[in-house]
Amino acid sequence: MSKLKKRWMRQSILAMSTVIVTGSILCGCSRQEMTRTISLPDIEDEGKGISGIVIKNIQEYTYGGHSEDNLRLAWGKTGSNTAIQLRYEEEGYVYRKIDINTKETISKEFMDDRMVSNIQIAPGGRYVSYEAEPAKKASPELVVFLAEEGEHIVLREWNESLQFFSYIWSDDGTKLFSWQDGDNYAFSPDTDWCVTCYDMETVKQDSNGGLTIEKKEFRMEGNGHAWRHVLPNADGTKVYVREEYESFSDSKEKEYSENQEIKKKKAAKNWLIMPEKQEIKKLQEYADEPVNPVKYTKKGLYFQKEGKLLLVENPEDTPSVKELFRVAGMEVNICGNGDHIFLIEWMDDLQSMQLSGVKLEGTEPTAKQALYKASFEGGDCISADDSAIVLQGYEYLENDRCNFKVMELGY
């Protein structure tokens, strides 16, 4: 997902029960905390007489701190009126669940005192995944923190410090997916790679009192340096995967003269992973040039190309592409059902962030509606599900102070 402005400040128990599937076979200063709730009127698409996106309320939590605070904010489970705060303090990273009405800390847990990176708070805030470097060795490890239990599980350790991974949570916050980056030139382009699913619903205690979790590895065939996209559906039961090679556009040219074997290696590939069935299905190609997949939903696969948003209907069998509307210069977020599209754009000389929405009736989009606008120095979308969209942002104040905000827009 493209980031349009300064982004949010950047950021032992072994996992067990592995299943491997081969893709080629199965083709500081005083701080303040504030909340506010805003009710908004219904909005209608006047041009078509169709109800658009109706924002029922906005709940906002603000933490006043310093610009150097290594802070993460998220929203708790929908309807719980809680916010999640993850901040580096004297003892290390501390996780807090906060009641947004009383501003009191409901629970507080120590998370980790090591250097960490790639922090991701799962939707709902129950889990936090991150990479950490053990004190006695240079190689990192992937860890998931179970906030309610105050426990950690080491999901994976690797020896190559130059090996990089990407991660994404399913919208319901129950499954974490991990995969090796394909554009890392420190490694052979023909090295096989895996998409790994960690199912948090399988966490259980073993006979020694430790925690275990089931993981499933889906092995993909390495075929050159490539851009890799992994997009789970809302509950993580289906996962769309695309590997697009750097010479993909060249291989689509009619006058391209290399032999078929070389052309095959330079093509793009698409798969559908079904973790519960432990299967991989090869999908047909739907594009003739590089694209940016955005979201895999019940309506189909959304992707961006040349500043436009498009929808692939029926991507699992016979893909059909429909062009929707232009989204150049916008960050696109889509709910799991695929019928609510949210657009973030920067206005007023990049001093304001505006959230707009488009509703789909079938495959026909309604007019774009402005849903929310605020003064921010930076921000983005945390999550968009079928009942709310969660945003985060920050604004600089004087004397090196900063307001960090997280807000839920229910619809």
Image (cartoon, grey):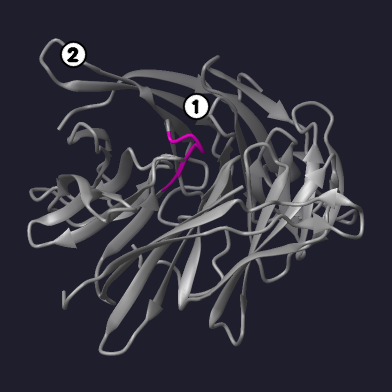
Residue name at image x 32 percent, y 43 percent: 129
Against 95, residue 148 (above or below) is: above
Circles 1 and 2, Cβ within 8 Å, touching? The answer is no
* Mark 2 closeness class: few <14, some 14–19, many ≥20 residues within 10 Å: few
User: Looking at the picture, how far across and down is residue 386, in whole percent?
Assistant: 61, 40
Q: Residues within 10 Å of mark 1 (few under 14, many from 20)?
A: many
Mark 2 secondary-structure assignment: loop
Foreground tag (1 vs 2): 2
What's drawn in magenta, residue-wise? 166-173
Q: Is there any visible trace of residue 259 in the rendered image?
A: no
Q: In this view, does 189 lie to the left or right of 90?
A: right
Give the residue at x 61% y 85%: 348
Vertical comparison of 309 with 268: above or below: below
Magenta stretch contains residue 234: no
Q: Residue 234: which quarter of the image?
A: top right
Local secondary structure at mark 1: strand
Q: Position of residue 366 (x, y in %)?
A: 83, 54
Residue in the picture at 82% in, 59% down: 367
Residue at mark 2? 206
Q: On the image, which quarter does residue 142 sit in? A: top left
Mark toward the start of the polypeptide (1 vs 2): 2
Q: How many labels does the image show?
A: 2
Q: Which residue lies furthest to the top in this view?
A: 207
Q: Name the residue under label 1.
A: 218
**Residue 105 located left or right of residue 127:** left
